[in-house]
Image (tube, rainbow, N blue to C red):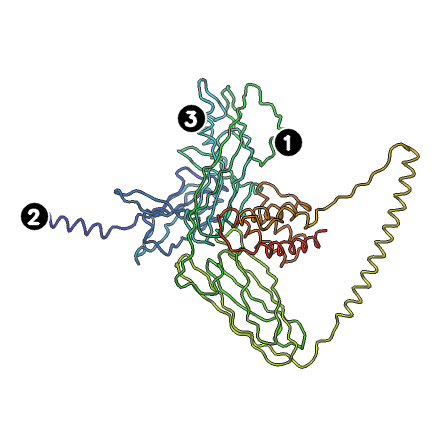
Amino acid sequence: MKRVAFILSLIILSGNSNAQVLFKTIVPSEPVIAGESFRVQYFAEDASAISNFLAPDFRPFRMVAGPDIYPGEMSHQNNFRQSKNYVFTLVATTPGKYIIPGAVISNNGKQIKSNAVMIEIISKDNAQKKLNKEAAVWQSEYYLRPGEDVYQKVRQNLFIKVVVDKKSCFVGEPVLATFKLFSRLESKSDIVKNPGFYGFTVYDMVSLADKQLTTEYVNGKPFDVHMIRKVQLYPLQAGTFIIDPMEVKNKVEFSRSVVNKKTEQQIVEGMLNSSGDTDLPAEGAEVVETEISTAPVSIEVKPVPEKNKSNDYTGAVGMFTIAAKLEKSDLKKNEEGFLEIIISGNGNFTQLGSPSIQWPSGIEGFDPLVLDSVDKAKIPLAGKRKFRYGFVCASHGKYVLPAISFSFFDPDSNKYKTISTKSLPVSVSNEEKKNIIIEEKKTSIAAQSEKISRIAIGVVVFLVLTVLAYWTLRKREPAVPTVIREKTYASVEESLQSVRDLKTTSDKELFKELYEAIWKHLSNYFILAGTEKNAHRLLSILKEKGAGIAAISSLNEILSDCEAGMYANASLSVDKEELLKRTKAVLEEIDKTLL
């Protein structure tokens, strides 16, 4: 008996050792309407040993998005396993039956392929016929049956969710947060509170204005799903941060008469109440008001490892390449040259600082202009950031701009990597750069004189017309004086008045007061509210208005520092006087552009 038991145990162990990871393909069980999107999911039950996911060729379908990767956790024989779901969004244009091929993953060096699945695509006419046949079974949720609890019905058929792609990440590694409204009801929804993304740099991908609407099944029932907001969140420092709730007020209309009405939803932000929504319900219908919100989400942000961190590491997280080039390698004395450094790849572009340049003796370098070109649909951000440095040399000779190193942390491999450019030779001739500045100044002065003359003539004409208007009005209504008011702008000094008492102000209070003062001062020119009130949108507007790249970059750094100090319980060694001076200089530079 002992020998038999021993043999059986060997068979069981052998079976377990050869067991493979469960990897399957999931498609909608119901036919898909031609022209509408649907999701294909590749689900791996045990993701701990998975690598090298390879998607199949989806032709003749058109791929809209993907792969969106959703990690999860499953219980298997009292053990918890980390699962992973790769999701693609496809569109089919022609009715018929198609095979969705399996995907391939590597598991401990072995390739595993998921199952192929058949899917049916039907025309809109056939879908409508199918819908009409099911109408008797699937009554519209617009109908409120006798004795039915209206609030329970709302809870079951109208809710809001926030989904994050991860709850643990490194500093600088993005977290994707998606806010969705699910509804099967005739409803009007108003977003009354947006979440604060404290401790993160925020990059908006999708907003309410994009009006993205899809259909998803929950417990076997189709829901209209409205994409409210989709953002990439880049952590500023280590710690535990909370994405607080998004709050929504709803007006839901029901009918107590049996109807087969397709429900429709309206979703706005801070508009229903302010616009005086006074629409009366249809005859025999009633309206109930409810409030819903997302659950708060906790994100654990880990510090990047200290081991093997290079001295020139400045916080870049992702996968990058670097290149450098000179606009001209042969210059004259005192002629301005330009060095361009381009960092490409994917990662936290919004947080990349300018590389440090060790200019050779005899060459004077200047602060760079920063230009971004990124694809907001990619996670993390993909594209490039260009740094354009100006420099001059007063003496002739041959110089070499040394190689420029750039270090970043790769969260996929959990390692630091350092990349470098090639050194670049610069030749400066003994010929002096012709001084055309004087001529340019003369031209500029002449242009300014002409401009001043035009302005003076305009002022004279305006004053004459004003006097004529004054006497005309005085003759008609002598008892009523005319008052002309000009719009006044708060100066930078006035806006920063609230942060003057630096000796008694704590770091956290200073960051908060400075952050509020900056937004208050910029409200001189434009007001942002709701989802529009974020640094990314503000900096985009300033760029459109013609503000300098250097000023925009400095303002972005100051706002990021303020957010870190306000919300991350940061203990930062900060020179308060220097921070205030830097903020004052940046705002004054922006004022010159906008006034």
Q: Position of residue 324 (x, y in %)?
A: 55, 69
Left/right placement of residue 201 relative to residue 541 reads: left
Q: Amino acid at mark 2?
A: Lys
Q: Amino acid at mark 1?
A: Ser
- The answer to whether residue 403 is seen in the rendering is yes
Indicate the secondary structure of the residue bearing disc 1: loop
C-alpha separation, residue under disc 3 versus residue under disc 1:
39 Å
C-alpha separation, residue under disc 1 versus residue under disc 2:
83 Å
Tag on residue 96? none
Q: Position of residue 404 (x, y in %)?
A: 52, 69
- From the viewer's perspective, is the residue at label 3 or at label 1 nearer? 1
Q: Position of residue 234 (x, y in %)?
A: 49, 51
* Residue designated by label 3: 137
C-alpha separation, residue under disc 3 versus residue under disc 2:
61 Å
Tag on residue 275? 1
Tag on residue 2? 2
Q: Are marks 3 and 1 in contact (CB under 8 Å)?
A: no
- From the viewer's perspective, is the residue at label 3 or at label 2 nearer? 2
Indicate the secondary structure of the residue bearing disc 3: loop
Q: Which one is earlier in the sequence, the residue at label 1 or at label 2?
A: 2
Q: Nearer the viewer, residue 111 or 234?
A: 234
Q: Nearer the viewer, residue 347 or 584?
A: 584
Q: Nearer the viewer, residue 585 or 459?
A: 585
Q: Residues within 10 Å of mark 2 (few under 14, many from 20)?
A: few
Vertical comparison of 399 with 194: above or below: below
Left/right placement of residue 368 relative to residue 150 reads: right
**Which residue is pictured at 70% across the width and 49% down the height?**
491
**Which residue is pictured at 59% across the width and 59% down the height?**
371
Q: Residues within 10 Å of mark 3 (few under 14, many from 20)?
A: few
Q: Amino acid at mark 3?
A: Val
Vertical comparison of 97 with 173: above or below: above
Specify the farthest residue to the right. 475
